[in-house]
Image (tube, helix red, strand yellow):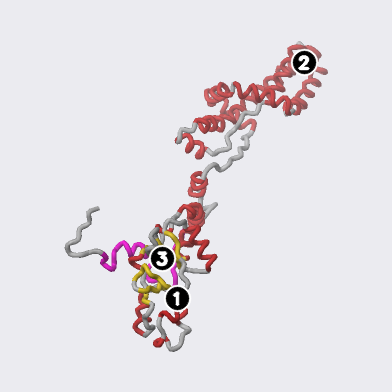
């Protein structure tokens, strides 16, 4: 009896030291990787979905072993010593099972039979499931494994956690570095410019106000030759405006950015150079549009910012209507 009890005590310690591996990925991330044919993710998902069942089986086996060991000791030593030894074993087996040398030993053999153990847990879920609550739910540490997962978590957060505008701001910020200047600039077809030799008379100023814009690229001939910037706010403090030309009041510094650059770089340029407007050019140095700091921040926070001088909320939408009737001759035909 004693030898059988000793063997069972050893088995008790070994069983109690088994620590099934879990998944540090959420179900969303595991399934995303499985959809991409990641076999390691499939194994990781099985570990995560069965770990609590394996832990419950471990506790059930430990409980049965304690009962059997106590019964054997009572039969062998009598009630007094049997119960005493049973209590001692119940108190110390957990400490022995947590020893590093024992855990390494059992973990090595567990990994060898892990696939079988996972299959067993999956096959017996319906039987062991009701006992899970007896031993308490096991905590699970989750690591966010991808930007897609983080976006999913934010997008599915309830209003009690994140308000709608907060979710939109966070989602917009996540995508910010991936957004290109060309997708959010004001196209050249709706960029209002002014000639470098224009006189700032009443008619010119009235025309400027009617555009609803606050910044005007100053051109020398055409929009591909921008030589300065005219800021309408600066005109308010000028005296004798009728005798001044645009050349005399314009800002001669012009900053350019390539259309294939990210909004992140555009925002950094605006902050570094303290500019609220950048001229957008293509690889041939041709002007393709302009982008303002408001355009950039709108994409960062996910909400529209209406400038006090802006007449239109979305100049890209205006450009799509072709308000200036560009390339529409009577005999014109679009091939594709």
* Residue 316 position within the rendered picture, expressed as x and y whole percent measured from the top left: 36, 62
**Mark 3, secondary structure of its residue:** strand
Q: Is residue 150 magenta?
A: no
Does residue 212 lie above or below 169 as drawn? below
Q: CA distance from mark 3 to mark 2?
A: 87 Å
Q: CA distance from mark 3 to mark 1?
A: 14 Å
* Residue tagged 3: 290
Instruction: Give the number of the mark in front: 2 or 1.
Output: 1
Reading the chain from its start, which is encountered first: label 3 or label 1? 1
Between residue 164 and residue 214, name the one nearer to us: 214
Q: CA distance from mark 2 to mark 1?
A: 95 Å
Between residue 225 and residue 296, name the one nearer to us: 225
CB within 8 Å, label 3 to label 2: no
Does residue 148 lie above or below 315 as drawn? above
* Residue tagged 1: 231
* Residue tagged 2: 73
Residue at image coords 45%, 62%: 257
Residue at image coords 50%, 69%: 275
Q: Which residues are magenta?
A: 302-326
* Residue 167 position within the rendered picture, expressed as x and y whole percent measured from the top left: 50, 54
Judge left or right: residue 318 versus residue 108: left
Reading the chain from its start, which is encountered first: label 2 or label 1? 2
């Amino acid at each position: 009896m004693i030898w059988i009890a000793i063997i069972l005590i050893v088995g008790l310690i070994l069983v109690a030291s088994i620590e099934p591996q879990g998944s540090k990925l959420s179900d969303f991330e595991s399934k995303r990787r499985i959809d991409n044919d990641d076999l390691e993710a499939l194994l990781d998902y099985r570990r995560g979905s069965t770990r609590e069942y394996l832990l419950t089986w471990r506790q059930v086996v430990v409980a049965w072993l304690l009962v059997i060991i106590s019964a054997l000791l009572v039969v062998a030593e009598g009630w007094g010593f049997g119960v005493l030894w049973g209590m001692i074993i119940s108190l110390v087996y957990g400490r022995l099972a947590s020893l590093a040398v024992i855990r390494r030993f059992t973990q090595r053999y567990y990994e060898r039979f892990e696939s079988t153990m996972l299959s067993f847990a999956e096959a017996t879920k319906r039987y062991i499931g009701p006992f899970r609550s007896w031993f308490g739910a096991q905590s699970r540490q989750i690591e966010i494994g991808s930007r897609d997962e983080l976006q999913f978590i934010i997008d599915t957060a309830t209003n009690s956690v994140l308000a709608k505008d907060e979710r939109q701001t966070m989602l917009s910020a996540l995508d910010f570095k991936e957004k290109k200047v060309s997708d959010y600039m004001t196209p050249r077809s709706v960029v209002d410019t002014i000639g470098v030799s224009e006189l700032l008379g009443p008619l010119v100023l009235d025309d400027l106000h009617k555009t609803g814009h606050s910044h005007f690229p100053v051109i020398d001939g055409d929009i591909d030759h921008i030589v300065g910037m005219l800021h309408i706010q600066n005109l308010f403090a000028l005296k004798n405006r009728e005798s001044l030309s645009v050349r005399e009041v314009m800002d001669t510094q012009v900053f350019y950015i390539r259309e294939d650059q990210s909004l992140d770089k555009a925002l950094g340029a605006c902050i570094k150079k303290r500019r609220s407007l950048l001229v957008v050019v293509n690889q041939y140095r041709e002007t393709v549009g302009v982008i303002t700091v408001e355009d950039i921040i709108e994409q960062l926070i996910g909400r529209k910012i209406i400038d006090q001088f802006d007449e239109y909320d979305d100049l890209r939408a205006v450009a799509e209507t072709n308000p200036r009737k560009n390339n529409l001759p009577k005999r014109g035909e679009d091939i594709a």
